[in-house]
Image: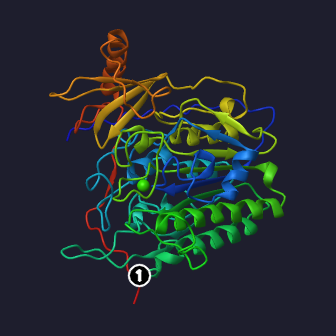
Amino acid sequence: MLRKWLLVATLISLPMSAQAETPNIVLIVCDNLGYADIQPFGSKLHRTPHLNQMAAEGMKFTHFYSASGVCTPSRAALMTGCYPKRVSMDVTDGAVLRPVSQIGLHPDEVTIAELLRGAGYATAAFGKWHLGDQSAFLPTKQGFDHYLGIPYSDDMTPRPMKNWPPLPLVRGEQVIDAPTDRDLLTKVLTEAAVAWIREHKDRPFFLYFPECMPGSTRAPFASAAFKGKSKNGPWGDSVEELDWSVGQIMAVLKELELERSTLVIWTSDNGAPRRNPPQGLNVPLGGWGYSTAEGGMRVPCIMKWPGRIAGNQVCDQLATMMDFFPTCAALTQPKVASDRNRDGHNILPLLEGKSDQSPYKRFLYYRTNQLQALRSGNWKLLLGRQNQGPRLYDVVQDPGETKDLAAANAEVVARLRQLARQAEADLGVGTQSGPGCRPAGRVEDPRPMVLAN
Ligand SMILES: [Ca+2]
């Protein structure tokens, strides 16, 4: 594959702010949790009192997007502020990375953790990484001082004809337990995250907490205090434990009097996948996780920062997880602001109520390397394939994507198609990389992560 890597050598230095405030940042990302799986977003099944409290004290985003319907590309976008295709994490071992993979997020990519570490932050990640399980790709090589968690999804356990090891719990770069007890993941990681906050309360810190649940198994896991307690089986049990988890984080921040100096973000990496019978819920959005439907890529998101974000706010403007990087850059103003193209935007004006306009001219919906749809304003255009024409939905009025308005709005279809062509000139088409793409990382001799003898 011919790749062209544009090296933009110019460092853009940002002006120093009058108020050089550097808040702690806590970024919690659940795995496969659907839009309507928590009460602030309409769940009638799951009890989520701590998230209700968080929404009452902060801002709820009702048009917040992951950059992918699946895990690995979504997390690559979150870490880098780029579309997965830009950093060539759109297709890895198929749609996502598998254990013992040759591929990972390129070590040269500047992650949000490296950005914040460069600004003097203590950094740690607790949870599911899924950006490469080889030493060169682990969180400790991407800006995190400390890591505890599973390197990929909770369902990636030994199976015939695969060199997959028992599911490892990794601290730093060492496997400390395998197979790790999946029932305890939420509990153990939460307790470790709370302890880490206590240890780092006196300096700015960045806590990245990619929760492992509800995860990718048919029956998600929960500890004894939650197992069998919800009205929605294992899925509901795991969601209610995730609510407990964010409650623990908020409690320690309150106890340490860090609430006003901490931005807490809570979201999911993609929508709830289709199960029979259904477990997670994405209503009123159409479709399921692992797709470019609204239900696949629009996720619940709450942000809380007392003093900077007013309570009980709802933001209905389009924002994405690619915005975390530029927003943190704007907050912390480190010298390494940007040495390469990024796709996200600084959304502080939305958070602070200083703007009611999305910074996005258009948002791209990729499934692996296929640009399947594009949103601009209220309009979402499904680009269509050879045997199917384009379809156009007003996803504000019709989030279920039920009424195709393409025929009556030919000029909108044409305008969005033009935007798609512009994006493809930068990011390439299908397996082709465009001039704006950068390579993934690759190692020759991948090894399973196993306990040392
Ligand atoms: Ca996921």
Give the percent coordinates (x, y) of residue 311: 77, 41
- Residue displayed at 56% across by 42% down: 325
Q: Position of residue 106 (x, y in %)?
A: 39, 51
Viewer-nearest residue: 185 or 139:
185
Q: Residue at x 40, y 64 (%)?
A: 153
Where residue 109 appears, x then y in whole percent?
A: 45, 47
Left or right placement of residue 266 versus residue 384 in this view: right
How is colour applied across the structure in the image?
rainbow
How many residues crowd mark 1 within 10 Å: few (<14), some (14–19), many (20+)? some
Q: Amino acid at mark 1?
A: Pro
Quadrant housing the N terminus: top left
Report the front residue among 376 and 235. Answer: 235
**Of residues 227 and 6, which is closer to you in this image?**
227
What's the residue at 30%, 21% (across, down)? 421
Asked if residue 67 can be seen in this view, the reply is no
Q: Is residue 288 left or right of residue 22?
A: left
Where residue 133 sits, quadrant-wise, is bottom left
Residue 402 seen in the figure: yes
Identify whether 328 is placed above or below 174. Answer: above
Considering the numbered disc 1 on the image, is that residue within a helix, a strand or a loop?
loop
- Residue beneath disc 1: 179
Measured as percent of width and height from the top left, residue 416 is found at 36, 18
Residue that lies at the very extreme toward the left in this rendered image? 387
Q: Is mark 1 within 8 Å of ligand 1?
A: no
Q: Is residue 152 left or right of residue 352?
A: left
Q: Quadrant of residue 431?
A: top left
Please name whichever residue, 42 or 260, is drawn nearer the observer in this view of the structure. Answer: 42
Give the quarter of the figure containing the C terminus.
bottom left
- Quarter of the image where ligand 1 sits: bottom left
